Image: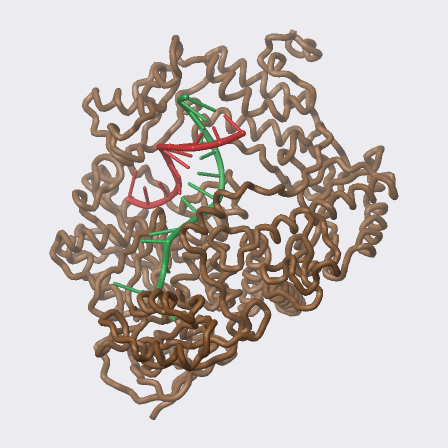
Chain colours: A brown, B red, C green
DNA sequence: CTGAGACGGGG
DNA sequence: GGGTACGTCTCAG
């Protein structure tokens, strides 16, 4: 018997003689890859009874069907809707039988319902054994010969034990592929892969078929590229494979190419290929024993809010956001990849550089993102593979689930389809309160906001599925805003875990303050507190999420009702008790200044904040956020601010979308910056007028006007003829090969009729024929008008139709 | 305003 | 595989 301590990377199971064997994959303290099997774990679920346990047990064990086999029934006590309740714990022979068994059991006399019959076997194991993915586990067992590609294989004896402590260094590699496709997005059925690049901590390689710089390893053919990748993963003993949008692109591509080349692709620690799954819009690609993590999910889910709508979620944009410039993505025009590939040696080297950089940039991003993902997986106790692909709601749910198990509470079922749909159909309830802004420019504005408003409301008022309108407090508990009451005797699971999350976060932030900025421990703690913040902020949404196990729509609407009450209350305190001027407020924040907009707001604000906090219940708190020297409020949710450090805070104004021309985007940016930095409306106005004049005078380039959009499907599949579709049709008639993925660049030309009828291809566009009126009225003016209107300038003035008060400048 | 349909990332 | 499913925006009616 040997003992091993390893970091739990992944968990799955294998059927051996009709029984499930748990497999844990990881890396030991000593840096060896390991698989640990456990043959002793049995699948089960709970049945809620309304008849005597013994009678039901007898019936269950007697039942003989080919679909499932009930091997054991035990009597257990669990908390069910806050009350201790008796359940039958029903064991089946293997996990796949649970689905059949649960329905049959539910149909039996004496059984009311089943519970916890929809939890994946590996996750069940983690929950029951109280393990945490991405932390250390100690096991004892017998070594055995495994066909898996691991250093150590152990068949476990006894129980696994979760341990505190650092995890060993994991072998992480990033990869990226390039394909040869003369037109449009590469199609794996037709277009070969020409190179694959990998980057780990100490290796950087491109596998391809042509000679190139030192980092290129030349192979015979495309199949050789696949084999070289497999060899790399095996030799470097890779634990985590990361890439960008690889669930949707690279992995399916590799899979299809391998199939066409009649090559059995083996990227995992066993002989199986890539396990591709597609559920609706979401795809996943897994390989046994290694974690394939697509960083795009992290960007798309976790960073969504942080990046805002302006920033695209392309690798280039994300790299630009997180990496220093010199580390950034090399950019080549990928429409030209085929030309670089077939071109001169210099062209080919450029392509190799590009391919290599893509893998390196991805690796650098994974160095930042993966440790964050580790902390998330650990906190919610879901294997990294799933945690990295999981939405906010599911993360909260996972956290509730392990807490329910720890507290011996029954986990509520997920809603069935009809219930889900019914929830989706219910009318939306009133959301947050937004204070109508005082439009225009303001100076010396202080911003205060509630620390975790919704979580603290849920905690303070004990809002939960199990506590809302409870029988035990009927008539006794006071109804809160929104008209419901919440149990005064028993705490609900959601308030309990939220309190726990907020307290943990405070602790970690204290600890963080003691650490040296940038140290390993600092980064780890910072990632943990970030993950806790994500969880806390997602809790409210989860209450009203239609797929939620702990759904309580009325609970969620009570949260917003209380939120409205609190924010209105502080607006009133600012006005009535401190004679301040609230200029804007949204949900949990308030922008205030003094009546004369003086710097005195700084001192008065301190007193205001203290007064508010004295009145708030325990965990609730109003915090000082920032002081702005100037700001322009345009409308609800649309404003731009600048603080003393000259940092800009722009919200809602970036309705610069991809169908906007560069000249419109640039004009909007310049205008806002000028307004905030100089506080000079006239100057901003001049900028707009100058651009309008440039357009009128024809002083622009095609690139100023061009909008680029990709075709997302075959041309004939478009039902609506958008401008880029119309242009694609023209290009096709001209003999060009336009297909899915082809980027269409177009400019709007002058003339009559629909915009789409006047859209012309960028290439060969006669700059003299652009539609001046369109670019002024539908591009420039809309981009700046909302801001300028808030400052008292109408569209007519902007366009110069009316010689308003600025005629002196342009007269 | 409401409902249906497009779209994201990837080369 | 004990999981069946996203959120946001635009445009037509």
Q: Is residue A666 above or below residue A765?
A: below
- In this rendered view, identify the residue nearer to me: A163 or A99: A99
A373 relative position to A624: left or right: left
Viewer-nearest residue: A720 or A773: A720
Q: Position of residue A32 (x, y in %)?
A: 34, 79
In the image, residue A560 sits, relative to residue A30, either above or below, namely above
Residue plotted at (51% across, 67% down): A379
Q: Is residue A171 visible?
A: no
Which of A611/A670 is in front? A611
Q: Residue at x 21, y 26 (%)?
A: A736
- Identify the residue at horizontal 35%, vertical 55% (top origin): A243
Coordinates of residue A675 in the picture (x, y in percent): 66, 29
- Is residue A728 visible in the rendered image? The answer is yes
Q: How many marks?
A: 0
Q: Is residue A730 left or right of residue A663?
A: left
Vertically, is A145 above or below A656? Answer: below
- x, y percentage for residue A353? 31, 48
Q: Which quadrant holds residue A651?
A: top right
Q: Quadrant of the N terminus of chain A?
A: bottom left
x, y percent for residue A406:
53, 75
A165 to the left or right of A639: left
Q: Residue furthest bottom?
A: A1
């Amino acid at each position: 018997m040997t003992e091993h301590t390893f970091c739990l990377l992944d968990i799955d199971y294998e059927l051996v003689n009709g029984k499930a064997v748990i497999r844990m994959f990881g890396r030991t303290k000593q840096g060896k890859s390991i698989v640990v099997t456990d043959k002793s774990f049995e699948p089960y679920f709970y049945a809620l009874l309304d008849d005597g346990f013994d009678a039901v047990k007898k019936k269950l064990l007697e039942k003989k069907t080919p679909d499932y086999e009930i091997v054991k029934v035990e009597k257990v006590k669990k908390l069910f809707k806050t009350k201790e309740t008796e359940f039958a714990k029903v064991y089946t022979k293997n996990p796949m039988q649970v689905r059949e068994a649960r329905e049959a059991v539910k149909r039996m006399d004496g059984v009311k319902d089943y519970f916890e019959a929809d939890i994946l076997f590996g996750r069940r194991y983690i929950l029951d054994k109280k393990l945490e993915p991405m932390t250390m586990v100690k096991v004892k067992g017998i070594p055995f010969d495994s066909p898996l590609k691991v250093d150590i294989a152990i068949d476990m004896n006894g129980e696994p034990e979760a341990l505190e402590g650092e995890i060993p260094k994991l072998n992480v590699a990033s990869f990226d592929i390039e394909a040869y496709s003369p037109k449009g997005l590469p199609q794996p059925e037709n277009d070969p892969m020409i190179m694959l690049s990998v980057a780990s901590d100490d290796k950087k390689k491109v596998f391809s078929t042509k000679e190139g710089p030192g980092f290129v390893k030349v192979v015979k053919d495309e199949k050789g590229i696949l084999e070289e990748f497999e060899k790399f993963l095996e030799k470097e003993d890779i634990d985590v494979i990361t890439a960008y949008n690889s669930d949707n692109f690279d992995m399916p591509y590799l899979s299809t190419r391998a199939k066409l080349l009649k090559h059995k692709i083996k990227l995992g620690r066993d002989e199986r290929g890539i396990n591709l799954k597609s559920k609706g819009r979401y795809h996943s690609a897994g390989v046994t024993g290694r974690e394939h993590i697509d960083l795009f999910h992290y960007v798309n889910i976790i960073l969504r809010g942080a990046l805002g709508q302006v920033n695209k979620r392309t690798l280039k944009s994300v790299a630009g956001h997180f990496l220093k410039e010199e580390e950034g993505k090399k950019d080549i025009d990928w429409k030209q990849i085929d030309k670089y590939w077939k071109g001169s040696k210099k062209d080919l080297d450029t392509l190799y550089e590009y391919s290599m950089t893509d893998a390196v940039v991805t690796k650098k991003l994974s160095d930042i993102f993966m440790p964050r993902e580790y902390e998330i997986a650990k906190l919610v106790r879901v294997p990294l593979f799933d945690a990295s692909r999981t939405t906010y709601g599911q993360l909260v749910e996972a956290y509730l689930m392990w807490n329910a198990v720890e507290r011996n509470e029954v986990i509520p079922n997920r809603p069935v389809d009809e219930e889900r749909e019914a929830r989706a159909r219910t009318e939306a309830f009133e959301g947050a309160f937004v204070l109508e802004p005082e439009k225009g420019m303001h100076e010396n504005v202080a911003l205060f906001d509630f620390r975790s408003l919704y979580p603290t409301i849920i905690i303070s008022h004990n809002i939960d599925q199990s506590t809302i309108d409870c029988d035990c407090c009927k008539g006794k508990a006071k109804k809160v805003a929104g008209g419901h009451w919440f149990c005064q005797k028993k705490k609900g699971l959601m308030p309990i875990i939220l309190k726990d999350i907020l307290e943990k976060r405070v602790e970690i932030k204290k600890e963080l303050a003691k650490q040296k900025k940038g140290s390993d421990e600092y980064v780890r703690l910072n990632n943990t507190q970030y993950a806790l913040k994500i969880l806390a902020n997602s809790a409210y949404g989860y209450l009203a999420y239609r797929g939620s196990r702990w759904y309580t729509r009325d609970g969620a609407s009570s949260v917003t009702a209380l939120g409205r009450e609190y924010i209105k209350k502080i607006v009133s305190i600012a006005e009535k008790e401190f004679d301040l001027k609230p200029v804007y407020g949204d949900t949990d924040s308030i922008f205030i200044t003094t009546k004369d907009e003086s710097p005195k707001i700084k001192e008065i604000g301190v007193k205001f904040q203290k007064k508010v906090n004295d009145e708030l219940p325990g965990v609730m708190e109003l915090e000082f956020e920032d002081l702005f020297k100037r700001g322009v409020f345009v409308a609800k949710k649309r404003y731009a601010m600048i603080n003393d450090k000259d940092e800009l805070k722009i919200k809602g104004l970036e309705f610069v979308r991809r169908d906007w021309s560069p000249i419109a985007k640039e004009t909007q940016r310049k205008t806002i910056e000028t307004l905030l930095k100089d506080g000079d409306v006239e100057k901003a106005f001049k900028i707009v007028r100058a651009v309008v004049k440039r357009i009128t005078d024809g002083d622009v380039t095609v690139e100023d006007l061009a909008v680029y959009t990709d075709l997302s499907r075959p041309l004939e599949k478009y039902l609506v003829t958008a401008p880029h579709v119309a242009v694609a049709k023209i290009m096709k008639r001209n003999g060009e090969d336009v297909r899915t993925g082809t980027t269409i660049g177009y400019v709007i030309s002058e003339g009559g009729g629909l915009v789409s009828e006047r859209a012309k291809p960028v290439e060969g566009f006669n700059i003299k024929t652009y539609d001046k009126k369109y670019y002024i009225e539908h591009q420039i003016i809309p981009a700046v008008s909302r801001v300028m209107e808030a400052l008292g300038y109408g569209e007519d003035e902007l366009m110069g139709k009316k010689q308003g008060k600025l005629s002196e400048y342009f007269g």
